[in-house]
Structures are given as structure tokens and as C-alpha cells.
Image (spheres, helix red, strand yellow):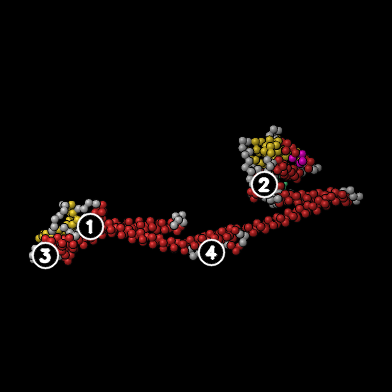
Amino acid sequence: MQLNTISGRFAALTIIFVMLAEVLILVPALASFRLDYLESRLERGQIASLAVLASDKSLADELEAELLQSAGLLNVVLRRDDIRQLVLSSRIPSPVVQTYDLREDGLVQTIDDALGTLLNRRNEVIRVIGAPVNQAGQLIEITMETAPLRTSMIEFGIRLLLLSAAFSILTAILLNVAVQRLVLVPIRRVISHMVSYAEAPEDARHIITPDARLIELRDAETALQTLQKTVTSSLKQKERMAQLGQAVAKISHDLRNILTTAQIFADRLEDSGDPKVKRAAPKLVNSISRAVNLCETTLAFGKAEEPAPTLSRFNLAQLATEVVEAETLASGDGPRVEFLCDIPPSLTIRADRDQLYRVLANLARNARQAIEGTGQPGTVEIGAGETDSDWWIRVGDTGPGLPEKAREYLFKPFAGSARKGGTGLGLTIAADLVRGHGGRLDLVRSDAEGSEFMIHIPRDMAILPARQMAGGR
Ligand SMILES: Nc1ncnc2c1ncn2[C@@H]1O[C@H](COP(=O)(O)OP(=O)(O)O)[C@@H](O)[C@H]1O
Ligand SMILES: [Mg+2]
């Protein structure tokens, strides 16, 4: 029997409780046993004395001794018609120490006397007074020794305890069987359901059908069923999304190759002799390169797991300058966008240089595109610094602020783009890459005066595994 199982605990508790109950009734039972014993001695005394009174002659000594011995008594005194008469007598081995009057004793007194008898190991002589049966006289008084009484009481107590032990073991066994059938079998059924479900959660056949008869278990089964249904359906959904993602990745890949070929041919059109064709060519080239860009960003995002950052120490100002140079080159003939770098020249940080380049390039390009969209000149500023715990990089601009839609779907893939030809992936990828460094990317300000993004990268970088990074968006 194991104590850390339900049935084990039930059995142990049953035995303990039954024994406890038995001990509680043992004391009153012993008191009542003692009372019965004394009363039966009184009765024997009365019968023996009646035998003596019936014969006129005085009794031979041996006969008197035999009568007393078989009754277990020393003396018998009868009181009839107000005359007290010593009917049977023998030599008393020691003086009488205590007198018990059974006509007067209440329950508490009886229990007290019983405990006294049990605890006193000495054999003493006591006097017991009671009313004779059938009103044969006024009272009867006997003198007797306590040792036989005490022995009988102890034997009775042991019998009672043994009986209750047997009784509690039987109860425990029965209860155990009941618990097994009523509780454990259904619980094991639920557990085995869970196990087989966990092996193949996509398989709807493993979902439990609630059929327990106990209400509590049935509730548990119903809750489990709801949970399993939700899990199974979201797993299916996820699987479908993954398949869709793969399809999109394949299409993007092939489309990019096709478009790159188209781009080469479109480039040649610029040399055409036909002025109409020549004029249309740059627009065609532009459209195609936007399409190529869309395919490439989709593909980059489709690589669900960005590789974990490869950390190195490098100068941040230098990296920012590279970003600014690339963006300055990319800015067209539109309104002037000025790039400022406010980074301590000696600031070096530990991060994945390529990934951080992509992050800054995304933020700077967004800022430039936003400013260009207004038709007004503006400024993009990259600032950086360090604290005891992390490095921070700030990319601010004097653009128009993020449109409502972009703010609502900030960092959500494909959803937040408010720009013609945009994918809505730039910020998502940037946030993912920063998170891969254990850091975070926040939009700290966005209003009519401009926007400001802030990157924090912790110094003691707890690199999250790549999978967690991809799943964390
Ligand atoms: N600095 C910014 N100022 C104004 N709007 C911005 C800025 N950065 C991002 N946005 C808005 O957020 C949208 C989402 O940006 P992004 O995730 O990079 O996708 P994409 O550039 O492909 O549209 C952009 O379309 C743009 O409307
Ligand atoms: Mg962008």
C-alpha cells in the first residue's frame, strides 16, 4: 500500500479514523462493562445468601467458603426489615479501601471509577452496595477483591480493540475497492486519453468524449475536450498557414528570377530608337525593381528563423555612416533629406554587425521615404549612447509621423504598410532582429513634427534562441 496514491491515503485514513472512534467509545464501554460485572457479583451474592437463609441450620465452614469462592466474593451482607445481617463471611486478606454504592453513581463517576480500577495495579478489597433484585430486601452489600475485575476489564478492552482493528481493516479494504472503481479507473482513463492525445494532437480522433458518471470528473473531461478541440483546430490552422507560407516563398523566389530577367531586357529598352519606348523605359525599370524588392523582402521574411546573431565588437559611428551613405545614394531627385549622425566616435558596441546594419537601414529608409512623401525637405538623425546596462540607438526624423494604419499594425508583418509599393515587413524584420539580441525596438514618438524609434540592446546579452525570436512576434 503506497501512501502517495489516492487509494493508499484512503485506506490509511480509514484505519486511523475507525481506530480513533473505537478508542473514544472504549472508555465508556469499559465503564459499562465494570458496572455489569459488579452488578452480576451482587446478584451472585444475593443468590448465595438466599441459599444460606433457606436452611435453618448454620452452614458448615467449608460449604460457606465454597459458596463465597464460586461467587468470587469475600463477604455478603443483606439488609432486610431494617436488620443488617452478615450472611456469608470469610477472612478478609486486607482492610476495605473503598466503598462503591451502585445506587447513587452517575455516568461521570462510573467512568472515573473504571479508569481508577484499570490504572491501579494493586489487588485491593472493595465494598460494593446495591439494591437486590426482585425487591428481596433493602440492600445488599458485598466485599470482593479487585484483581479479577481488573483482569476481566483488560481482557474485554483487548477484545474490543482487536475487533475494531479487524473492523477498520475490512472497512479500509472495501473503501479501497470503491475508490478504485469509482475514482481511479475514470481518472486513469482521462490520463491515458491525455497521453494518446499528446502523441498526435492533430488527430481529432484522440479527443476525449465525456462519459464519466461522477459530475466532477465529467466536468474535467468536458474541460479537457474543449481544450483539445481548441488545440487541434489551431494546430490545423497553423499547419495550413505554414503550407501557405511555403507556397508564397516558392512563388516569390521564382517570380524574382523571372523579374530579374525582365529587368535586364527593360534596361535595354532605354537604348531604343523609338522615343515613346525610350520615355516609358525608366518607369518600367522602376516598377520591375519594386517588384523584385517585394519578392526579396518576402523571401527574407519567409526564412522564419533568422540566424542567431554573430556577435562582434565594432564602431557604431562607422556603421551609421555606411547606412547614411547608402541612403543618401538611394535618395532620388526629390526634396532634400539631410542625414545627421550624433554618435560618440569612440562608441563601440557588441552585436551582429550585418543584422544591425539591416535594422538601421530599414529605419533610415523609412524615415527618408516618409520625408520624401511630404514633398518638403527634412532631417533624419541617428543618435546613440550607452548606459551601465545597455546601448541605445535613436533614429528620429522630421517627417509627418506614422500614418494611423502603420501605428495600428506596428511590427505586424504585411499589415502596416501605408506606402505605395511597401510590404509592411521592414519594421517587423527590424524588431525581430533586435529581439534576437535580447533587446527591443520601440516607437517612442510619432506626431506631426516627426517620428522617433529607439533601439535598446542589453550589454549582457541573453541571446534568445532563433526559434523563440521568430515565434515571439
Ligand atoms: N519614420 C517614419 N515616418 C512615417 N511613417 C513611417 C516611418 N516608418 C515607418 N512608417 C510607416 O510605417 C509603414 C510600415 O513600415 P515598414 O514596416 O518598413 O513597411 P514598408 O516600408 O514596406 O511599408 C510604412 O509604410 C510607413 O507608412
Ligand atoms: Mg520600410
Q: Which residue is mark 4?
A: 210
Which residue is at the front of the view, 10 or 87? Answer: 87
List x then y, in percent, for residue 162: 33, 59
- Mark 4 within 8 Å of ligand 1, using the beta carbon: no
The answer for how far apart the CA atoms under marks 3 and 2 are is: 116 Å
Circle 3: residue type: Leu
Specify the label residue 432 is tagged with: 2
Q: Nearer the viewer, residue 263 or 13?
A: 13
Residue indicated by mark 3: 53
**How much space separates mark 2 and mark 1, taking CA atoms?**
93 Å
Q: Which residues are magenta?
A: 323-327
The 10 Å Cα crowd at callout 2, few under 14, some 14 to 19, many 20 or more, is many
Which mark is nearer the camera, 1 or 4? 1
Q: Of the two numbered discs 1 and 3 on the same chain, state the one appearing first in sequence.
A: 3
Cα–Cα span, label 3 and label 4:
84 Å
Q: Which mark is residue 148?
A: 1
Q: Position of residue 292 (x, y in %)?
A: 78, 50
Tag 1's secondary structure? Answer: helix
Amino acid at dot 1: Pro
Q: Can the viewer see residue 172? A: yes
Residue 189 position, x and y percent, is: 52, 62
Q: Amino acid at mark 2?
A: Asp
Reply above or below: 187 against 453. Answer: below
Element at label 2: helix
